[in-house]
Image (tube, helix red, strand yellow):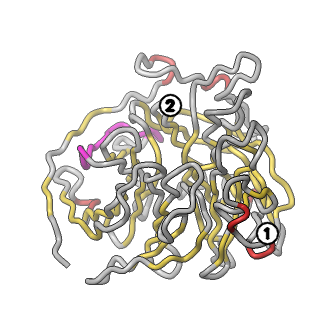
Amino acid sequence: MRKIIIILCLSVISLSCNAQSSKKSDIQLEKIKLPAGFQISVWAEDVPDARSLAMNGDGSIIFVGNRQGKNVYALVDTNKDGKADKKYTLAEGLRMPNGVAFKDGDLYVAEVSRILRFRNIEKTLDKPVFEVVYDKFPDKAHHGWKFIAFGPDGLLYVPIGAPCNICEPEEIFASITRIDVKSTNIQPEIFAKGIRNTVGFAWHPTSKEIWFTDNGRDMMGDDVPDCELNSAPQKGMHFGYPYWHAGDVKDPEFGSKGKDKSAYTAPKAKLGAHTAPLGMRFYTGNQFPAAYKNNIILAKHGSWNRSKKSGYNLTRVVLDANQNVVKQEVFAEGWLDDASQDVWGRPVDVLQMPDGSMLVSDDMANCIYKITYSGK
């Protein structure tokens, strides 16, 4: 396959990480509520439209994707004070480069229709070069931004959202695909179907099964249907869209064209209507209390078309030994003022650091937070 290689000019700037003195965003950390013993700080500020997160092998470089803008960033804590102080612009002028993933020294970036690769990125931050790995994904912008991650099988998982709110699209849409980035003749394989729009997934630490969030359809009212948390232990499962939503809500337009709801996989958990769950990770570190081990922490980006806003928080999902959801509860909140309905931030993705702390991106406040636990 012919590769396109582009050399990019570098932009490096210093980052101010003092939320109290910032004039570029209205970060209101004092409003964030966390369980006892947890603290939140601003790890990086002035990161426009901070979306999906990935890190290199030792966590010394954090890569940040972008949806509304066109850039991809790398953030580094050069003075080792626990906050990023240098921002590299790795690419400019891309189309919704939301997804970022790191493997074997290379950074992968997902645009709407292309997967890019920056080889040996750790040593080329000041001289970034990318090549086009694959450029034949659909070019539809509606739900076209992508979260990407490498699975335990070494393949790159790439979702393709439905090109609409509700429709019966071509088979490649409303799916999670996977590709072999080492192949010279890449052919996307559909791993799971009936997924309206997932912008976050991860693999269970012990079973290695993929779990993913899915955003429910709009225009059915404030409370219907729920957004979803799903798992797919095997290839070929169908999760209902566009015929059924949240396992038991028959679509008024397309439900009659589908099968009985029993033919589709119901969600592991319902996450509330219009809450827009995006990034999620299993917590496997040792810094948080032992009860958090192998829990899911997911970001609810928040509603846009609900009469009373919902979401705008981090949610903790607790699983039992059989990977059944036994509890879900708010882990962090305060980006939304319930009384006034004012919103100052929207969490997007979460990323566990090597020391067990957690980073959280915010594409409204244009920053990345750090959550730690000290027990105090």
x and y percent of residue 273 in the render?
73, 44
User: At label 1, which amino acid type do we have?
Assistant: Lys
Quadrant for residue 182, please give it: bottom left
Q: Residue at x 51, y 74 (%)?
A: 151
Q: Is residue 340 located in the magenta-colored stretch of the structure? A: no
Q: Which residue is mark 1?
A: 261
Query: In the image, residue 227 lies at what x, y percent?
Result: 70, 51
Tell me the SS state at disc 2: loop
Crowd band around label 2 with a 10 angstrom C-alpha radius: few (<14), some (14–19), many (20+): many
Bounds of the magenta span?
A: 81-93
Q: Can residue 246 be seen in this snapshot?
A: yes
Q: Quadrant of the N terminus?
A: bottom left
Of the pair 100 and 93, the residue shown nearer to us? 93
Q: What residue appears at the point 84 percent right and 68 percent down from the top-left corner? A: 320
Q: Nearer the viewer, residue 286 or 352?
A: 352
Q: Is 19 displayed left or right of 221 in the figure?
A: left
Q: In which quadrant of the rendered view does residue 347 lie?
A: top right
Q: Which mark is residue 364?
A: 2
Point 77% across, 42% down: residue: 330
Numbered circle sitting on residue 309: none
